[in-house]
Image (spheres, rainbow, N blue to C red):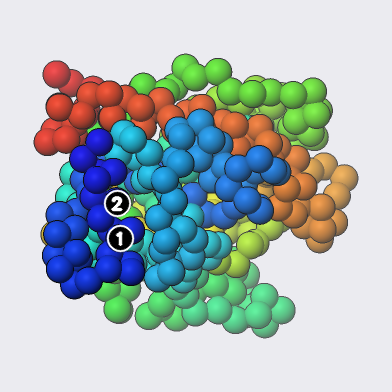
Amino acid sequence: MRHFATLLLLATAVCGSAQTVQIASKPIEIKVVVIAMFEQGADTGDVPGEYQYWVEREHLSTVLPFPQGYHDLRLNNDGILGVVTGVGTARAAATIMALGNDPRFDLTHAYFLVAGIAGIDPQIGSLGSAVWSDYIVDGDLAHEIDAREIPQATPEDRKLWTTGYVPLGKSTPFEQPRAARFGDDGNAYHLNSALVDWAFNLTKDTELPDTPAIKARRMEYDTANPASPAHRPPFVLRGDNLSASTFWHGKLMSQWARDWVKYMTDGKGTYAVCGMEDTGTLQSLTWLARAHKLDINRVLILRTASNFDQQRTGLTAAESLAETKVTKYSAYMPALESAYRVGHIVVDNLVANWPQTRDHIPTNTK
């Protein structure tokens, strides 16, 4: 109950004296920060976004004003703090930086879980599946020429210019050596794989929601491969994340994403899902860790598949994009459910074992 006394003092400080602010100076120790990217309307009781199930089921009932960020914060009795970043890398970076510098909170032992929806590559997973990522790759930091102006005069041009997207500081797509002229800061983030291993093993057998509608839809993808992962019922897997504020779509863009992630991770990462905020979140968390505000080794990224990142058989990319809208995604509600079902197992475990997890990051070895 100590943090509620602190909250009362903080609320009093809004209209109180400087002396009251000094009394309330001891920050609240946060155990887990759950990061969502959007909410549709109210935080409870209507059509949900990424935040609502966490608010309702983890009882995030204490609302804390957060005018320096995108959305008010929410806290529960167990030290779980919920934040909504807003859509896009810029909003995410600004919100997380504001949170990290908020004097009301002690985040030095906190774990951070990003839990949101994404598009998935049908060669990797299926609708409603949950993906834990080791690598988060930026898909915005680049040079670009219009695809209609890609050099095609020679066979070598056609082999080289598979895209109009060129890494910063380079002259051609996927030019080697990869190391950028401006350094690697912000190109790719490698999470603590030991923690990702632990989270994956803890949740890999979680039963995820399936419906006749998403079963029928997933069978319309990768139709030439009867054993395609796209055809599986929703499952928990490992795969890497391409983060870009442009909502791209289509088979050709999906191939670019596979190549871009391979390039930016020196062949170590495998593209699985696309989101719009995670490099912004990680940029702020990285710099906050540098300022000793938090531990960057305590970050997890979980994305669940609300849609495929490309068109199904018989549609063009443009036709597919036209039907790919928030709340209209083919697996929107199952993906929200999957994010909570998988994510809360990790969150609840960290909190239940706080005497150990506060000072020791869990791994699969004793």
> Which x, y percent locates residue 284?
32, 64
Q: Residue at x 46, y 34 (%)?
A: 59
User: Residue 36 location, x and y as percent?
Assistant: 49, 49
- Displayed quadrant of residue 152: bottom right
- Which element type, helix, strand or loop, lies under badge 2? helix
Whole-number angstrom distance, CA of label 2 to CA of label 1 = 6 Å
Going 79% across and 33% down the picture, which residue do you hit?
217
Q: Which circle marks residue 222 in the picture? A: none
Check the image and name the residue furthest to the front: 16
User: Residue beneath label 1, please?
Assistant: 12
Q: Residue at x 40, y 71 (%)?
A: 68
Name the image quarter holding residue 62: top left
Q: Nearer the viewer, residue 68 or 137?
A: 68
Which residue lies under the disc numbered 2? 8
Q: Which amino acid, by three-letter code, is at mark 1? A: Thr
Q: x and y percent of residue 88 in the render?
A: 53, 65
**Residue 195 drawn above or below residue 234:** below
Relative to 260, residue 63 above or below: above
Q: Amino acid at mark 2?
A: Leu
In the rendered structure, are the residues bearing label 2 and label 1 in contact, judged by CB atoms less than 8 Å apart? yes
Residue 87 shows up from this direction: yes
Residue depicted at x 18% and y 21%? 365
Side of 44 where 138 appears, left or right = left
Q: Point out residue 104 in the picture as x, y percentages from the top left corner.
A: 25, 58
Q: Quadrant of the C terminus?
A: top left
